[in-house]
Image: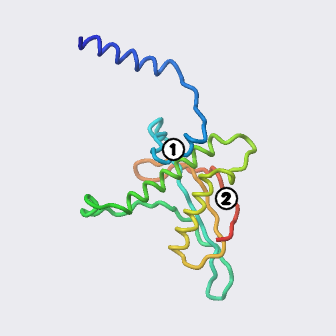
Amino acid sequence: MTEVLFIAYFLVLLGTLIFKTPIIKSPWLFLMRAFFPNWKFFHAVGHVPHLYARAQIKNAAGEPIWSEWQWIYPRRQRRWLDLFHNPHTNLGLAQQNLVDHFWADLYDLPEGADARELVTYQLVLRLVQQVLREQQGDITQCQFELRMELFSRTDMTDSHTMMTSPVVPC
């Protein structure tokens, strides 16, 4: 009996490799995906989406200047207490999951379509505005970029910009 189950298991695996299922698109499934992580990073090792942002602030003379591009999701230092209560890392993982969904939506976007119509674009814009306000205080305008970056064991080896948002008031 065990041999039959073992063979049936491998036949099911073989069937899933051979027969491709169609992509199901539905507004209800789109809303439900917020409950599930984006597992596309398991498909291949390669470029990873990273969100960068900059803000326009006023210097001491009152002139508007742009800050440097900064990575929105830097890794946080781990502590022993995080083993039991870890809300900051969980929030960071949810935010990175949003960036992953945004990348997937941009990748699936038809040629010539406006990315600003995407729900994930609006959510990422709000995330950028919130983070920049927390870090830099009084800002007038902001902008973000979605970059695909490839890392080696020691440093970044390749980076290209997938999308740059227009400058928006914050």
Q: Quadrant of the C terminus?
A: bottom right
Closest to the observer, 64 or 126? 126
Provide the residue designation for mark 2.
165
Which residue, as the protein is rendered here, is positioned at the far bottom? 61
Name the residue type under label 1. Met
| Nearest to N terminus: mark 1 or mark 2 | 1
Q: Looking at the image, is 166 positioned above or below residue 147?
A: below
The residue at the point 57 percent across, 64 percent down is: 128
Q: Which mark is residue 84?
A: none
Which quadrant of the view contains residue 91?
A: bottom left
Name the residue carrying label 1.
32
Who is closer to the viewer here, 67 or 12? Answer: 12
Q: Amino acid at mark 2?
A: Ser
Residue occupying the far right of the picture: 112
Q: For residue 78, which quarter of the picture?
A: bottom left
Residue at figure coordinates x 47%, y 21% from the top left: 17
Residue 87 screen position, x and y as percent: 36, 62
Query: Number of labelled discs?
Result: 2
| Residue ID at (34%, 18%) | 9
In percent of width and height, residue 83 lies at 26, 58
Q: Residues within 10 Å of mark 1 (few under 14, many from 20)?
A: few
Which mark is in front, 1 or 2? 1
Residue 59 image position (x, y, % from top left):
62, 83
The image position of residue 161, as x and y in percent, is: 62, 52
Q: Residue at x 58, y 57 (%)?
A: 123
